[in-house]
Amino acid sequence: MGNKVRFPITNVNDIVGVYRDPDEKLYASLELNQVAFPKTGMVVSQTPLGDDFTRANPCENGMWVVADKAAGAINPPAAATDSPIGIVYTTEKEYDYMHYGLQRFGRKVKGDYPRVGIFGLGDTVTTNCLQYDDSNFATEQALWDALEDIDNNPLYVVPGVGATGAMKAVPEIVKAKPGTGFYAKIVKFYTVPNGGKGVKYQIMRL
């Protein structure tokens, strides 16, 4: 195993980009393409985040979490077989006139209440809330090349259980189809709503 690396969050179509502090943290974005949970009611919104989510590493849209009401807290998956796994899709906010747009959402920490949709088979989303292991993709360009070639060499998304802290909630892109547990298949190398690079994936096994 190598190092876990976040999928880069690009600053695209940002009309205040030239004025932005280069050290400002940008957050992941999410687009729900085809999901059942808004209609089926499989949404958790009254359970707080657990200890892994801190000010330095907050909860972001697109994270995969275990929304177990009985446990009394929403936490990252501890194993690929954890359930029920859902996706964070809390409404975006405009914090002020200099800090708006999908990539600036975040800042949810322990004790806060995100909105989590419980995944169903076939659900499809587009996001840049992803990570990869540099033993699989040695460089960012190697990741882009692999994503461009998914018609010939499929890629998959699995829970980030090999990471630590809140990074465990960031789904991981892998080359090998997992034999067990929750996973998605990448459908398209795409863009998130603000124009930055992203990935569309479909849930293949719960």
Image: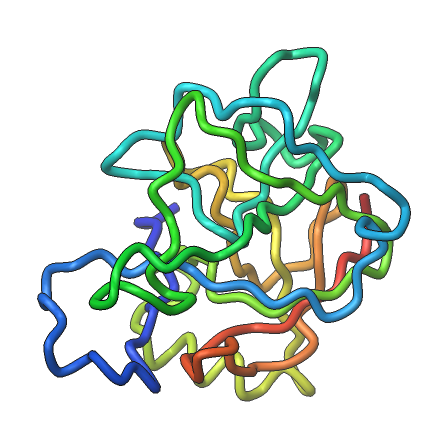
Query: 205 above or below 24?
Result: above
| Image quarter in which the C terminus is found | top right
Toward the right, the furthest residue is 40
The image shows residue 37 at horizontal and vertical percentages of 81, 49
Q: How many marks?
A: 0
Taking the image as shown, residue 79 lies to the left or right of residue 173, namely right
**Residue 142: percent from the left, percent from the top?**
38, 78
Q: Quadrant of residue 108?
A: top left
Give the colouring mode of the picture.
Answer: rainbow
x then y, percent, for residue 104 = 33, 60
> Extreme front residue here?
97
Determine whether, in the image, residue 117 is placed left or right of residue 163: right
Residue drawn at the location 43% of the way across and 58% of the way down: 132
**Horizontal side of residue 187 vs 193, given as left or right:** right
Up-down: is 124 above or below 47? below
Front position in the image: 90 or 145: 90
Q: Residue at x 43, y 40 (%)?
A: 59
* Rendered residue at 34%/42% (across/down): 107
Q: Looking at the picture, tell me which residue is in the foreground, 191 or 18.
A: 18
Q: Position of residue 203 (x, y in %)?
A: 76, 57
* Residue appearing at x 80%, y 51% in the figure: 38
Relative to 99, residue 194 above or below: below
